[in-house]
Image (spheres, rainbow, N blue to C red):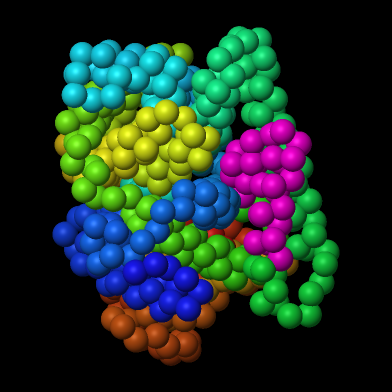
C-alpha cells in the first residue's frame, strides 16, 4: 500500500489510535512508549502490513519540526532555578561529552568493521560519521521517560540529564554535517571546523535568548481578543526562531531550547493554556516522528546488521558513554561515583540519532543505508535496555527520591493576581483547638477556599467539620502568610503551588 493524499489521513488516524492504545499497555509493563511507537510504525511498514514509505527527506522534515517543538516544550517545562546549580556539568556533558563519545565510538567502529569481514569496511571518517550521528542522548526519550516515571532523583540528577539531553543535539548535529562535508570534499581544515562549531553554538545561544525575549514581549503586548490564538502564535514563533537562527548560520536546535527556557521562566499571559497546548503538541509530534521512523525502516534489513549493531550498542553503553561522562565530570566534585554511573546509564538513544542518520542518506554517502539501519537497531536496544531500567537503576544505586506530589487541586491563577496557594493535608495536631474550620488559626488575608475529602470536593464554611486526611486549598496574599498557616497547624513540610 502506497501513502497518498487519498488514504494518508485514514492510515494516519489508525496509526495514532493504535499507538496510544498500545502505549497504555506498555506503561503498565514498563516498556517505554516511544519504543512502542517505533514498533507500531515497523509493523505497519513494508515488511509488516505493507505500507510503502521510502522518503528520508520527508522523514527529516517531520523530524526537524518535531524536535523544534519537543525541545521548546522541554525548555518551557524546565525551571531555571533547577538547572542553575548544574549548568556547568550539563553544558560540558552536552559538548565535551558528545565529542568524546564520537571519538571513542568512531575508533571502535573503524576497528570492528576492519576485523569483521562479512560487514562493509568503513573508513575512519565514515566510522566517525556513524559515531557522530549516535553521539547525543535523545531529548524526547529522556524527557518522556524521566517525567512519566514520576520519581525524583537525588543530587540534582534529573535537571542535569534533562539539560544535557536538551542541549547536546546541536553538537551532534554540527559534527554530523561537518563530517559529511569532509567526506564529500575530501579535505579537512581544523581551523575552519572549530570556527564553524563556535559560530553555530554562539549564534544559536544568543539568538535563542534574544528571540525568546522577543516572543515574551509579543505575547504580552499583542492583545489578541481570541485567547485560543495565543498558542498558535507561539507555535509560529518557535518555527521562526529555528529557521531564522539557521539563516544566521547558528544552531536552530539550541536556539529553540534556550528560547523555551526564556519563555517558560518569564511572566507570560495565558501560561496554563500555552503549557497545555505545547505539552499535547509535543506528544503528538513524538508519536508522529517515531511512527514515521518506524515506517521508513525495513525490519528484515536489520537482521543483516544485528551482529555489528549489538557490538556497537554494548560498547556505547558499557564503555564510550561511561568514559565520556567520567572525563567530562572530572572538574565537578558534587557528583558521587554512583551519580556518575547513573548519568552514564541514562544515555538514551532515540529519534534524534535516527533523524540525523537521514543526513548521510540524503547526501549520498557510501554505506549510508547500512548506517541508518545500525542507528535504528542501536536505538531499539537502548530503549529496551536503558529505557526500561531508568527507575530500577536509580533504586539500585540508592539515588531514588520522592517525586513531585500530585496536585489535588488543578487551579491556576493569572500572573497579575498576586496570591500564594498551597495544598494542606489535615493532620491530628491541626485539630487540637477544635475540628471546625473556624477553630483553625489562620493569618489575616488567608482563606481555605476548597476541601477535598476522598473523591469529593466542596466549599467549606466556618462551621464545617474537618477530618484528618482532608486536603485544603489555601490562598493567601504571600508566601509568608502561608508559612504561618503551616506552622500554626503543626506542619513542617511547606510548599506552594506553582502556576
Magenta range: 233-260
- The secondary structure that dominates the magenta segment is helix
Q: Quadrant of the N terminus?
A: bottom left
Q: Quadrant of residue 292?
A: bottom left
Q: Residue at point 49% right, 34% down?
A: 364
- Front residue of 387/240: it is 240
Residue 186 seen in render: yes
The spot of residue 208 in percent (x, y) is: 69, 42
Residue 493 horizontal side relative to residue 379, left or right = right
Q: Which residue is at a point 62% across and 10% down the rendered structure image?
A: 189
Res 417 visible: no
Location of residue 82 in the rendering, given as x and y in whole percent from the top left corner? 51, 41
Above or below, comparing residue 198 to residue 267 in the picture: above
In reply to whether residue 367 is colored magenta, the answer given is: no
Work out whether 270 lies above or below 100: below
Residue 427 vs residue 376, the one in the foreground: 376
Task: List x then y, in percent, for residue 66.
Answer: 52, 54
Position of 493 with respect to 378 (left or right) is: right
Position of residue 22 relative to residue 321, above or below, is below
Nearer to me, 327 or 13: 13
Which residue is drawn at the image coordinates 33% and 35% (left, top)? 370
**Image coordinates for residue 290, horizontal then vertical, percent:** 38, 55
User: For the point 78% across and 63% down, which residue is it?
Assistant: 220
Amino acid at each position: 500500500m502506497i501513502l497518498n493524499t487519498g488514504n494518508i489521513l485514514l492510515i494516519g488516524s489508525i496509526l495514532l489510535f493504535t499507538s496510544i492504545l498500545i502505549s497504555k499497555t506498555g506503561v503498565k509493563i514498563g516498556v517505554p512508549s516511544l519504543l512502542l511507537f517505533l514498533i507500531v510504525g515497523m509493523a505497519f511498514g513494508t515488511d509488516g502490513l505493507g505500507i510503502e514509505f521510502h522518503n528520508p527527506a520527508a522523514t527529516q522534515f517531520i523530524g526537524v519540526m518535531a524536535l523544534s517543538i519537543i525541545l521548546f516544550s522541554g525548555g518551557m517545562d524546565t525551571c531555571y532555578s533547577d538547572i542553575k546549580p548544574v549548568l556547568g556539568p550539563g553544558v560540558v556533558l552536552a559538548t565535551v561529552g558528545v565529542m568524546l563519545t564520537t571519538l571513542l565510538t568512531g575508533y571502535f567502529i573503524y576497528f570492528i568493521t576492519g576485523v569483521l569481514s562479512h560487514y562493509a569496511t568503513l573508513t575512519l571518517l565514515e566510522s566517525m560519521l556513524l559515531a557522530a550521528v549516535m553521539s547525543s542522548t535523545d531529548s524526547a526519550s529522556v524527557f518522556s521517560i524521566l517525567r512519566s516515571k514520576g520519581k525524583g532523583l537525588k543530587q540534582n540528577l534529573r535537571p542535569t540529564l534533562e539539560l544535557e539531553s536538551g542541549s547536546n543535539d546541536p553538537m551532534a548535529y554540527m559534527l554530523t554535517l561537518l563530517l559529511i562535508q569532509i567526506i564529500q570534499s575530501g579535505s579537512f581544515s581544523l581551523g575552519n571546523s572549530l570556527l564553524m562549531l563556535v559560530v553555530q553554538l554562539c549564534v544559536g545561544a544568543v539568538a535563542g535568548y534574544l528571540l525568546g525575549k522577543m516572543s515574551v514581549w509579543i505575547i504580552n503586548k499583542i492583545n489578541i481578543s481570541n485567547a485560543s490564538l495565543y498558542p498558535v502564535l507561539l507555535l509560529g514563533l518557535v518555527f521562526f526562531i529555528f529557521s531564522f537562527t539557521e539563516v544566521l548560520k547558528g544552531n536552530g536546535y539550541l536556539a529553540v531550547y534556550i528560547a523555551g527556557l526564556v519563555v517558560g521562566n518569564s511572566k507570560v499571559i495565558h501560561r496554563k493554556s500555552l503549557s497545555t497546548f505545547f505539552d499535547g503538541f509535543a506528544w503528538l509530534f513524538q508519536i508522529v516522528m517515531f511512527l514515521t521512523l518506524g515506517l521508513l525502516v525495513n525490519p528484515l534489513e536489520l537482521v543483516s546488521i544485528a551482529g555489528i549493531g549489538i557490538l556497537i550498542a554494548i560498547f556505547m553503553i558499557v564503555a564510550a558513554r561511561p568514559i565520556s561522562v567520567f572525563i567530562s565530570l572530572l572538574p565537578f566534585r558534587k557528583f558521587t561515583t554512583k551519580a556518575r554511573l547513573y548519568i552514564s546509564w541514562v544515555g538514551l538513544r532515540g529519534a534524534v540519532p535516527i533523524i540525523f542518520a537521514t543526513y548521510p542518506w540524503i547526501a549520498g554517502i557510501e554505506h549510508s543505508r547500512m548506517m541508518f539501519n545500525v542507528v535504528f537497531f542501536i536505538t531499539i536496544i537502548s530503549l529496551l535496555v536503558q529505557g526500561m531500567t531508568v527507575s530500577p537503576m536509580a533504586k539500585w544505586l540508592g539515588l531514588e527520591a520522592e517525586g513531585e506530589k500530585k496536585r489535588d487541586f488543578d487551579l491556576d491563577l493569572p500572573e497579575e493576581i498576586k496570591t500564594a496557594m498551597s495544598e494542606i493535608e489535615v493532620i491530628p495536631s491541626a485539630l487540637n483547638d477544635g475540628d471546625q474550620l473556624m477553630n483553625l488559626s489562620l493569618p489575616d488575608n488567608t482563606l481555605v477556599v476548597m476541601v477535598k475529602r476522598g473523591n469529593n470536593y466542596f466549599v467549606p464554611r466556618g462551621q464545617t467539620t474537618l477530618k484528618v486526611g482532608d486536603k485544603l486549598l489555601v490562598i493567601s496574599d504571600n508566601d509568608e502568610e502561608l508559612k504561618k498557616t503551616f506552622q500554626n497547624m503543626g506542619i513542617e513540610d511547606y510548599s506552594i503551588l506553582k502556576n
